[in-house]
Image (tube, rainbow, N blue to C red):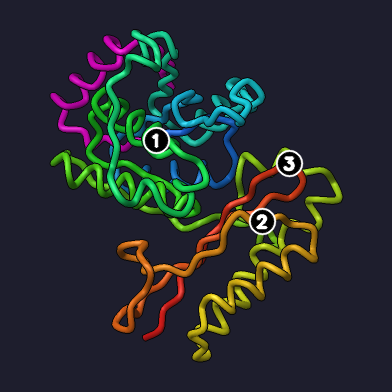
Amino acid sequence: MQRISDILPLREQRRKWQIDGKVIGFVPTMGNLHQGHLQLVKEAKKVCDVVVVSIFVNPMQFGPSEDLDAYPRTLEQDSQYLEELGVDCLFTPRAKDIYARGLEQQTFVEVPGISYMICGASRPGHFRGVATIVCKLFNMVQPNHAFFGEKDFQQLQVIKAMVQDLSMNLKIHGVPTVREADGLAMSSRNGYLTESERKVAPILYQSMLKLSEQIVAGRRDFRKLINEHSLTLYNSGFKTDYIEIRSADTLLQPGHEDTELVILAAAFLGKTRLIDNIPVSLE
């Protein structure tokens, strides 16, 4: 596995792959890899001749109250995981190269509408940071396919919209959420949970499953349902950021004609903000 930090060597390697007719897959990450990330790599290897994984902790998507410096960096362990999976290239750009003029002067990419709702309302500017770094990485790697986890459902929809709006020549793949045995969605954030919080954390997923069952059974009083499940989470020790029932296609409030919905939730357990989502089909 090659390890590349500079853009020019990456582009030279990309040119060689292109000459050889290779199909290039790309998995962008912020490192601290877990089985969810590794599943993205496995899916990429099924579709592509070569796979590039990037690790870059992106300062643009951290808010003022979010501790960028505390984000776990585990590069050597991550590199070992990727090498064992047969990744062709690990790209580890530096912040001084990505944002050479500093964040205040950086040209940015922003997807209107979808970036401002749900998680975007709770974390202003977050999806601007996501769209900007993903756009930059796409320009550097120039993949044919890119792979993202469905756990970050809104992020996936933002990236799909950006690719379509900017006429980018690649295909975006969403990969189903990988879960622990007790249902907790795998996330780098889980490492922040205390031992006691970790035992409580699966209740978020369990509550969402119950909510899904109630919707499928015919309940349409969504606001009352949300309030009931918010209370359940509160009584279990969570501080709910949001629970939303939205159209899976648009992330807007569902209409009577919508049959594919998604439940999205974010809640604090102690200092850790957990997010999750599950699809709901009414057909």
Q: Report whether 111 appears left or right of 55.
A: left
Residue identifier under label 3: 271
Q: Are marks 3 and 1 in contact (CB under 8 Å)?
A: no
Question: Which comes sooner in the sequence, label 2 or label 1?
Answer: 1
Residue identifier under label 1: 130
> In terms of depth relative to the viewer, which is nearer, 246 or 280?
246
Q: Which residue is at 63% across, 72% downward? A: 227
Could you tell me which secondary element the residue under label 1 belongs to? helix
Could you tell me which secondary element the residue under label 2 belongs to? loop
Q: Which residues are magenta?
A: 1-27
Q: Percent x, y for residue 265? A: 56, 59
For disc 2, the neighbor class at 10 Å (few under 14, some 14 to 19, many from 20) is few
Residue 21 magenta-highlighted: yes
Could you tell me which secondary element the residue under label 3 belongs to? loop
Distance in Å between CA atoms under marks 2 and 1: 26 Å
Q: Which residue is at 82% across, 43% downward? A: 194
- Taking the view exactly as shown, the residue that stands out farthest to the right is 196
Residue 215 vertical placement versus 276 (above, below): below
For disc 1, the neighbor class at 10 Å (few under 14, some 14 to 19, many from 20) is many
Distance in Å between CA atoms under marks 3 and 1: 22 Å
Q: Which residue is at 41% across, 72% downward? A: 261
Q: Quadrant of residue 74?
A: top right
Q: Percent x, y for residue 58? A: 47, 25
> In terms of depth relative to the viewer, which is nearer, 222 or 175?
222
Q: Are marks 3 and 2 in contact (CB under 8 Å)?
A: no
Q: Percent x, y for residue 225? A: 59, 78
Q: Quadrant of residue 21?
A: top left
Q: Given the image, on which type of amino acid does mark 1 rest? A: Val
> In terms of depth relative to the viewer, which is nearer, 256 or 40?
256
Distance in Å between CA atoms under marks 3 and 2: 21 Å
